[in-house]
Image (cartoon, grey):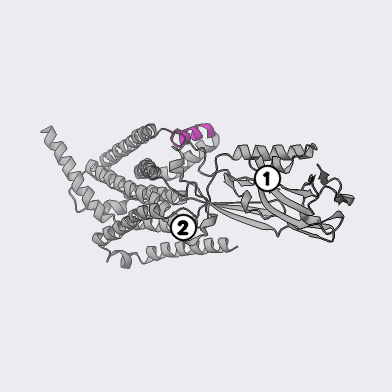
Amino acid sequence: MSRVLSQILLFLIGIAIVFMFKFKRPKFYRPLSWKLNVLATGLYLGVLIMLVPILYMLPAKDFIKTVESKDQAIASSLNLMNNLYNQHFPTEGDLDKLEGVYKNSCQTFKVDSSKLSFDLQPNIGNYPILIERKDIDDGEIDVSTYVTAQYVGEVNFTKRLLPPAITVKNGMLSLRAPDRQTFEFKQFNIDFTMAQFDNQNSSIHEMSPHFSNQIIVIRVPQSLEINRGVLGDRIQII
Amino acid sequence: MMSLKEVDLLSISIKQYVYKLKAYSTLFYGLLLAQIITLFFSLNGISHMSSSNGELSVSVNSYSASLVIVFSFFWILFAAIQLTTKQYKKIENPLVTNRISGNLSNIGFLMTACVFGGITSSLVGVLLRIIMYFTFDRSQIISDEFILAFSDLLLGISVAILYMVLISGMGYLTGMLTKVSMAFVIIIPAVIIGISKAYADIFQSLIKFFTLESSLPLFALKVIITSILMFGVSILLSNRGEVSQ
């Protein structure tokens, strides 16, 4: 809405300036000697030329960098989700090695009951939950969350995704989805005059997003009893 | 004798060119105004994309200085047409002139305007980047294309100048045609609209002839030859007008 208003305002300012010049032309133009005109246009050109070295001096460390290996990361992520769908479950070690898959949290909880039940928030999404039994009874539950490749255009922002909130209390593991996240990006497209000779079909880049999936891996002591309850289809023991 | 005449024509044209550069210098304010207004428009972004999957939403605002270049093209088009109007012809009155020297000096002025317009319109892209750098959250800016290679900047300037030369040729020819007969005021838009509707392929091929050329030397050659043709026809029409008057 504010954008529309600002554009209307600019349009009105433009109209006002045009009319001002049209009707006040003799008063405006007569005192303007060619010397003044050359000075004004020269100053304008000079300021613009001065900006070129300034642009190259600006540090670019804060900017978002684009990546080259997007296709490989997305293919790897899709392959992983496909394997999960086909009941081919990876271990935590496998996930650590996969390209495009990022571990975004790792927590350890003390076992406070002989059973482990689950409480999943309804809006948690379809996170696959994989349970891996340890070889020992160390009295600890290790929970790791993984996120598959998340891209918009060539920008990888997988690492910016927040993991779900996880708690273990009285033998109940609770998962709470993070608050809705909003990501805003600003993409600069080169002018069409450059794009024509820069092997680019369009000056506007393809910025379609590829959404990620989160995977939760829970490593439990060997003897801990798992109560999957009604969520048996989402919780897989591997 | 022949060479003396040519030297005279050239020196007269140069004198007129310098005179017109001073006399028409107010025209440049229109360009400055157009570029500044479109710069503000460009700061709002040229396109917006957003997508959501329920848990997160992603939005991308795209920015470009292309709008500034397009409005600079409009400016050179109208400037070229204006030079053929009676109001601007009156400025030539204090000078000893003929049609050819008048046209050559006009073309000289237009070429200067093209170079100025091409350089400034491309450099406004630099200004846009600097404004974005200091006013926007830098952690949201995608580095790709924001960091402009100097060779790309020079390429952009050259191409913008060439396009402006082409458009000024079109504008000058249009102005001359309307001088020959006011009927062309209706005929030219009618022909353009007619060809674009009835012979869309031809019309698109004509545009693609320039816009899809990916070799800079070839593009420059196409623009220079087409512009020489358009300015040449304009001079011939101008001479014809002189005989008929």
Question: Which mark identifies residue B133?
Answer: 2
Question: Which mark identifies residue B29?
Answer: none
Left or right of A5: which side holds B132?
left
Mark 2 nearby-residue class (10 Å; few <14, some 14–19, many ≥20): some
Vertical comparison of B240 with A110: above or below? above
Question: Real-space Cα distance between discs 1 and 2?
Answer: 31 Å
Vertical comparison of A20 with B180: above or below? below
The x, y position of residue B72, in whole percent, is 40, 50
The residue lying toward the viewer, choosing from A9 and B138, is B138
Residue sitting at 42 percent across and 51 percent down? B125
The x, y position of residue B154, in whole percent, is 36, 44
Q: Is residue B183 visible?
A: no
SS of the residue under disc 2: helix
Q: Which residues are magenta?
A: B200-214
Vertical comparison of B204 with B41: above or below? above
Q: Given the image, what chain letter belongs to the residue carrying mark 2?
A: B
Q: Are marks 1 and 2 on the same chain?
A: no
Q: Is residue B48 visible?
A: yes
The residue lying toward the viewer, choosing from A89 and A29, is A89
Q: Which residue is mark 1?
A: A148
Residue A61 part of the magenta-drawn span: no
Residue sitting at 74 percent across and 37 percent down? A82
Residue at far left of view: B1
Q: Amino acid at mark 1?
A: Thr
The residue lying toward the viewer, choosing from A112 and B23, is A112
Left or right of B77: which side holds A148?
right
Q: Amino acid at mark 2?
A: Tyr
The residue lying toward the viewer, choosing from A35 and A116, is A116
Residue sitting at 28 percent across and 64 percent down? A32
